[in-house]
Image: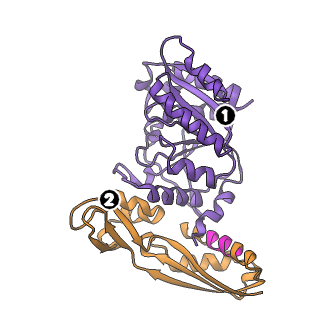
């Protein structure tokens, strides 16, 4: 259900962009979701369909997924996030606030928790297409 | 673009006042002042939320004795009630692990919590801030337009020097300052009161050093019976709710 709050943010942001660009009707909204937040695409799609206003009636939501790349700030090792290595409670905690990954994940090479989330953190609005 | 910031105003819409309890310096008692202020307002019949934004060193959950509580998922996260307060903290997710967050991570975690927390209707949201004038202060001023600051200092020059810098920053940012509280007061000197007023900021209260306070951590009934809480209660009754 957390996806609903994110869907509301996507719709609100898309409406703001549409107003700024003077778009009367939205045809396509492109969203990228980072693997780290483990957003359920089906729930996000359903929430978007329920929350979209009239000007989004014919809008298609394109959702692409991005792998999460983590980079150690100590040894510069780069690795991909994998949910399968986490227990259920930890995965859920990271789902709600991806930054708590720093409390649970360590660099597989040197063991440091000081890493950056280089790519694939959470929900990102990439593009909006519409007609004026 | 990051869509999350666009819903923050909506999430906070039904909150009448948002008070950040803050200090340029650590260890001055912000968390105890914030928690006791929130509890005092709640005991006066107000609907109150408490939001712990000290991500790397959260402590309000210990003061409240919060155990076995979690937010409920419902179109976001609904914080649980703890001792009558609608209570939110990163500790629900970081648990007892260290959360070593750098600036960008702090901003991201703050935006995430502001975007997903469903506070509902509140008279007051009291925020326990991390020490200093870094990312959380700047992000909150940017994202929460109605924020007011209550500043905590001690009688020490070391604390007050940083408080002066914080006051100047907030005045430059045109952020309302309710006033300052001089915590852990020892002696009778009124230097902090005079210096605060020179800055053009109201001196709200001096809170005597209370040796009983440490034993009241985790026990709200005991906490509210301390001399410390008595002073904060008077502050809640006068400068905050009047």
Instruction: Quickly name the residue at label 2.
Output: A114
Q: Which chain is purple?
A: B
The residue positioned farthest toward the left in the image shown? A110
Q: Is residue B150 left or right of residue B109?
A: right
Instruction: Quickly name the residue at label 1.
Output: B178
Residue B116 placed where, x, y %?
57, 61
Residue B71 highlighted magenta (yes or no): no
Q: Which chain is orange?
A: A
Q: Quadrant of residue A53?
A: bottom right
Between B202 and A48, the one nearer to me in the picture: B202
Count of residue discs:
2
Name the magenta segment's main secondary structure: helix
Q: Is residue A68 left or right of residue B83?
A: left
Circle 1 sits in a helix, a strand or a loop, which is it?
Answer: strand
Residues drawn in magenta: A8-15
Q: Which residue lies at the image location 48% right of the left edge and 31% below the top edge?
A: B29
Q: Is residue A23 above or below residue A108?
A: below
Residue B81 placed where, x, y %?
56, 45
Q: How is the image coloured?
A: by chain
């Amino acid at each position: 259900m957390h996806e609903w709050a994110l869907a509301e943010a996507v719709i609100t942001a898309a409406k703001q962009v549409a107003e700024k660009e003077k778009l009367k009707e939205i045809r396509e909204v492109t969203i990228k979701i980072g693997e780290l937040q483990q957003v359920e695409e089906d729930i996000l799609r359903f929430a978007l369909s329920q929350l979209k206003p009239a000007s989004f009636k014919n809008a298609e939501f394109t959702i692409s997924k991005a792998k999460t790349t983590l980079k150690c700030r100590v040894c510069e090792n780069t690795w991909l996030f994998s949910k399968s290595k986490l227990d259920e409670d930890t995965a859920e905690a990271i789902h709600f606030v991806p930054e708590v990954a720093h409390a649970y994940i360590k660099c597989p090479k040197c063991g440091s928790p000081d890493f950056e989330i280089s790519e694939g953190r959470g929900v990102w609005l990439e593009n909006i297409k519409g007609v004026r | 673009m990051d869509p999350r910031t666009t819903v923050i105003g909506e999430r906070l819409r039904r909150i009448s006042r948002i008070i950040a309890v803050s200090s340029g310096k650590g260890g001055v008692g912000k968390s105890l002042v914030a928690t006791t202020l929130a509890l005092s307002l709640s005991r006066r019949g107000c609907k109150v939320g408490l939001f712990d934004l000290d991500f790397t060193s959260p402590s309000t959950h210990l003061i409240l004795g919060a155990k076995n509580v979690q937010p409920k998922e419902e179109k976001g996260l609904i914080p649980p009630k703890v001792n009558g307060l609608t209570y939110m903290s990163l500790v629900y997710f970081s648990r007892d692990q260290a959360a070593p967050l750098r600036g960008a991570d702090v901003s991201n975690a703050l935006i995430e919590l502001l975007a997903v927390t469903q506070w509902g209707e509140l008279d007051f949201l009291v925020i326990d801030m991390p020490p200093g004038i870094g990312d959380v202060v700047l992000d909150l001023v940017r994202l929460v337009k109605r924020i007011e600051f209550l500043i905590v200092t001690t009688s020490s020059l070391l604390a007050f020097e940083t408080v002066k810098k914080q006051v100047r920053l907030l005045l430059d940012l045109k952020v309302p300052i309710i006033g300052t509280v001089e915590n852990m007061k020892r002696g009778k000197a009124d230097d902090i009161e005079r210096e605060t007023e020179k800055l053009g900021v109201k001196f709200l209260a001096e809170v005597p050093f209370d040796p009983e306070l440490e034993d009241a951590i985790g026990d709200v009934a005991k906490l509210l019976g301390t001399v410390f809480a008595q002073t904060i209660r008077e502050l809640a009754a006068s400068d905050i709710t009047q």
